[in-house]
Amino acid sequence: MSETGKALLLTIEAARDHLSRSEARVADIVLTDPNRAVEMSIAAISEAADVSEPTVARFCKSLGFSGLKEFKLRLARSLGSGTPFVHQDVKPGDDAGAVVTKMIDRASKAIASLRDDVDSAQLARAARAIASAGRLEFYGQGNSGIVALDAQHKFFRLGIPTAAYSDPHVHAMSAALLGPKDVVIAISASGRTLDLIRSVEIAKNAGVTVIGITTRGSPLTKLCDVAITTDVEEDTDVYSPMLSRHVHLAIIDMLSVLTALERGDAGVTSMARAKKSVREKRSA
């Protein structure tokens, strides 16, 4: 099985505990034999799981898909996609060359998976919302807080008032002070961080447009106006950085370019002024 296909199955497995009992039975059918599940009709899946056909549809929607057709297409594509190398973890005793190869291979596979799976329509929706934002704030905690800081560094150069917060007390207070013209981008590898979810709820109550960069089917996605989701087989190797960080940074880069294009001359002018201001700080 490809790494991409395994990543989607890991997403289903992680979501299983948050599904209803009947939906969890559908998840078990898929996890037991995903290749067979791709070929099964909704009637066959419902019979095998001993649930109703609407339950199968609800299972797909709980994972962020519009229905069984989209879910099966995604699963089939994931199971069928391959990579020209086999992943290996970094191990004690590996020399520098082996470490470099393994880490670059792992990161390359994660980015290649993003290329195949990211929803460009959602990226475009997010860029349009950001381009017209009165204020743009990035929320993340832990590793995702570092990604939020990187995002703020990119977007303030477009001439948009921005801030990044990783302290849950601070982003909760800030969310309460925003309004309908503002945008929050919530970044979470798991999509299950309670403090972050609470701050997003506060922002939603204030009328803020919320964009999520997170895992498909997570609780965070259900609160977002725009959800940019990924299926990342998260890194369990203690020697390597989290793969979600590479993927989320790439998504931030895509959004910054798309937003600059949306802003047109205003975005280009802002970036040019920002670059000009630091020229004198560099040696000849």
Image (cartoon, rainbow, N blue to C red):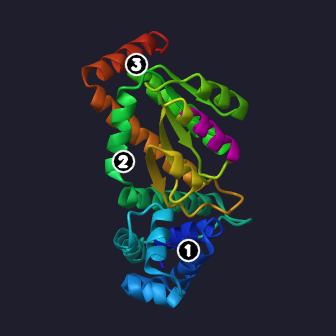
- Residue 244 percent across, percent down from the top left: 56, 53
Q: Which residue is mark 3?
A: 159
Residue in the foreground of this view, choosing between 135 and 116: 135
Q: Which residue is mark 1?
A: 23
Q: What is the tally of numbered marks visible in this picture?
A: 3
With respect to residue 260, does 80 lie above or below? Answer: below
Alpha carbons under labels 1 and 2: distance apart: 26 Å
Q: Is 63 in the magenta? A: no
Instruction: Label 3: state its secondary structure.
Output: loop
- The secondary structure making up most of the magenta span is helix
Residue 246 visible in this rendered orientation of the protein: no
- Residue 278 percent across, percent down from the top left: 46, 14
Residue neighbourhood size for the residue with mark 2, other residues' Cα within 10 Å, grouped as few (<14), some (14–19), many (≥20): some
User: What is the magenta range?
Assistant: 194-203
Closer to the chain start, of discs 2 and 3, is 2
Residue in the foreground of this view, choosing between 247 and 188: 188
Give left or right: position of 6 versus 190.
left
Report the mark closest to the observer, 1 or 2: 1
Residue found at x 69% / y 47%:
194
Q: Which residue is mark 2?
A: 122
Tag 1–tag 2 contact (CB < 8 Å): no
Residue furthest out toward the left? 265
Report the mark closest to the observer, 3 or 1: 1
